[in-house]
Image (spheres, rainbow, N blue to C red):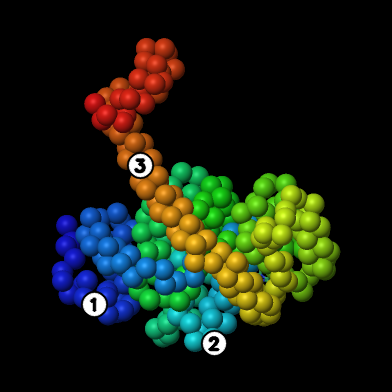
């Protein structure tokens, strides 16, 4: 097993990107060697804006996150992008867009891009995703963008994993209304109507804002700002950044601390779930078949899993 030599920890702490990449690899593999590095990373407190991006495949999430990198770099910010891709067996299997992004920003030490395979069920985010986010925060990035594929569990998990959730919709195909129906809009803190160069963008904005107005709200309710973007041309991106920062101000210190607490809860719960699933798999005989057949009651099966007997 690979032990974190003091030099790795020291190099990580000094902001060495190669040490960070190494730490991410350890955390992604769930190796215990990552734990001291995580401890170091987390000792620094809240340092980064952690922004999750969700939205249907093809809505322009990757293009938008690339445009965000460019705009944030122009503002002098250091940016890390973590793309969670359930189809990718490992970071070596980075999807094409990510690989292009990595190459484009390769020489820029203020940018770190990485693809992560999703290990959670249904493409959800795992405790390992959370660990990698923590490492990136420890690595001193001002912004950390978590890009999901926008399907299955990852669509919902993203809100639990980040400080702010950006939902990307397009004018085509009633995307906005779909989001409203699927209850995805509730998790959005900011909404980007991307591909605003296509017809129907302002109508989509109107649909979304009137849907928001219909929902229950009072003067304290955060209604996600809806911004038009043309990610492929970098247009409207600074407005999205401003809206995220406005949401951060709305959260305030207490609200942000609460989000962080929820993120930690998500991480610990994911770990517990992973371990229990592993235990259920390793239990002799098919535990669930025994419950189904009435041999064991469900409460007893749960006791068995929790006690590890
Ligand atoms: N017309 C138009 N196309 C865009 C825009 N943003 C992204 N695209 C295109 O939409 C396609 C899907 O984009 P991508 O970023 O890969 O979407 P993702 O699956 O959500 O990550 C690509 O062909 C992009 O070039 C935009 O603002 N306008
Ligand atoms: Mg993408």
- Lower position in the chain sequence, tag 2 or tag 3: 2
> Which residue corresponds to the image point at 42% horizontal and 49% vertical from the top-left?
265
**Where residue 116 sits: x, y (%)?**
42, 60
Report the quarter where the N terminus lies. Answer: bottom left
> Which residue corresponds to the image point at 38% horizontal and 40% vertical from the top-left?
273
Residue that carries the numbered disc 1 in the rendered image: 11
- Lower position in the chain sequence, tag 1 or tag 3: 1
How far apart are labels 1 and 3 at the CA level?
A: 31 Å
Identify the secondary structure beneath mark 2. helix
> Which residue corresponds to the image point at 57% horizontal and 76% vertical from the top-left?
68
The verdict on label 1 being within 8 Å of ligand 2 is no
- Residue 36 showing in the rendered view: yes
Residue 72 found in image quarter: bottom right
> In the displayed structure, would residue 198 be above or below residue 219?
below
> Which residue corresponds to the image point at 19% horizontal and 66% vertical from the top-left?
4
**Where residue 34 sits: x, y (%)?**
26, 61
**Where residue 85 sits: x, y (%)?**
48, 57
- The disc label shown at residue 272, or none: 3
In the rendered structure, the answer to whether residue 98 lies left or right of residue 280 reads right
Residue 288 found in image quarter: top left
Residue that carries the numbered disc 2 in the rendered image: 74
1 and 2 marks in contact (CB < 8 Å): no
2 and 3 marks in contact (CB < 8 Å): no
**Where residue 142 sits: x, y (%)?**
45, 76
> In the displayed structure, would residue 290 be above or below residue 253?
above
């Amino acid at each position: 097993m690979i032990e974190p030599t003091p030099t790795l920890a020291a190099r990580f702490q000094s902001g060495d990107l190669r040490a960070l990449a190494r730490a991410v690899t350890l955390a992604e593999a769930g190796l215990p060697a990552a734990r001291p590095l995580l401890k170091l990373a987390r000792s620094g407190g809240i340092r980064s804006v952690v922004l999750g991006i969700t939205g249907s495949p093809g809505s322009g999430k990757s293009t938008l996150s690339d445009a965000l990198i460019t705009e944030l770099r122009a503002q002098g910010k250091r940016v890390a992008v973590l793309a969670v891709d359930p189809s990718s067996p490992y970071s070596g299997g980075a999807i094409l867009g990510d690989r292009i992004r990595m190459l484009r920003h390769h020489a820029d030490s203020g940018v770190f891009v990485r693809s992560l395979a999703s290990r959670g069920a249904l493409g959800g985010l795992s405790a390992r995703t959370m660990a990698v986010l923590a490492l990136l925060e420890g690595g001193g990035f001002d912004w950390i963008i978590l890009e999901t594929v926008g399907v299955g569990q990852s669509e919902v998990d993203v809100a639990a994993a980040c400080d702010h959730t950006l939902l990307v919709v397009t004018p085509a195909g009633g995307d906005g209304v779909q989001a409203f129906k699927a209850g995805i809009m509730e998790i959005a803190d900011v909404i980007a109507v991307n591909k605003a160069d296509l017809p129907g963008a302002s109508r989509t904005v109107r649909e979304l804002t009137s849907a928001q107005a219909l929902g229950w709200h009072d003067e304290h309710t955060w209604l996600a700002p809806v911004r038009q973007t043309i990610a492929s041309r970098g247009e409207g991106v600074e407005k999205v950044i401003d809206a995220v920062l406005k949401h951060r101000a709305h959260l305030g210190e207490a609200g942000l601390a609460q989000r962080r607490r929820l993120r930690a809860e998500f991480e610990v719960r994911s770990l517990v779930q992973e371990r229990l699933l592993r235990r259920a798999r390793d239990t002799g005989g098919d535990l669930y078949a025994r419950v189904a057949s009435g041999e064991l009651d469900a409460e007893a099966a749960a006791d068995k899993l929790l006690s590890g007997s």
